[in-house]
Amino acid sequence: MKIFRNFVLLCCMLLGLGLTCVRAQDKVVYHFDNTQSQGLKGLRNIRNQLDSEPNTVIIAVTHAAGVDMLMDGAKDEASQTAYEPLIADLVSRGVRFEVCEITMKNRGLKKDQFILEATYTPSGVVRITKLQNKEGFAYLKP
């Protein structure tokens, strides 16, 4: 009986440890639809989040005017800060930046107009929905 009880206790401890490990990694989707009002603020938010919780999985989904920060040569209008080096740094820390292909089509944009760090998704809003509902990502909009 003692061996069975110890076995059950060990199994519960291992299960608890496994659940702790699963929960330890936060997953967040950042939603950008306006580069000028959200760009620098959102990139700072992402950087700050990674500084505090380096293991966070972060995907930044852009559509509408949010894709502008991922275009080659894009700068913040007010400060003239270039977005690309900030984004490249975040990508090196594991962040993924996705561009909505519907927006590209509607605006007549081509992939060669975007920085190399950009990745693509067929629909930004569908991607956000799936990340939240099916993959358990928290939603943040700067």
Image (tube, rainbow, N blue to C red):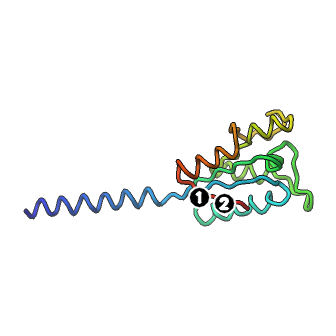
Mark 1 Cα-neighbour bin, 10 Å: few <14, some 14–19, many ≥20: some
- Amino acid type at mark 1: Ala
Q: Quadrant of the C terminus?
A: bottom right
Q: From what the image shows, is residue 54 above or below residue 121?
A: below
Mark 1 vs mark 2, CA separation in Å: 7 Å
- State the residue at coordinates (85%, 53%): 82
- State the residue at coordinates (70%, 54%): 31
- Left or right: residue 64 compared with residue 27: right
> Of residues 6 and 51, which is closer to you in this image?
6
Res. 10 image quadrant: bottom left
In the rendering, which numbered label is found on residue 138?
Answer: 1
Q: From what the image shows, is residue 113 above or below residue 46?
A: above
Q: Position of residue 54 (x, y in %)?
A: 58, 59
Q: Position of residue 6 (x, y in %)?
A: 16, 63
User: What residue is pinned by disc 2?
Assistant: 140
- Left or right: residue 80 compared with residue 121: right
- State the residue at coordinates (83%, 37%): 106
> Of residues 96 and 93, which is closer to you in this image?
96
Mark 1 touches mark 2? (CB < 8 Å): yes
Query: Which residue extends farthest left?
Result: 1
- State the residue at coordinates (83%, 49%): 65
- Amino acid type at mark 2: Leu
Q: Quadrant of the N terminus?
A: bottom left
* Label 2 secondary element: strand
Q: Position of residue 74 (x, y in %)?
A: 87, 48
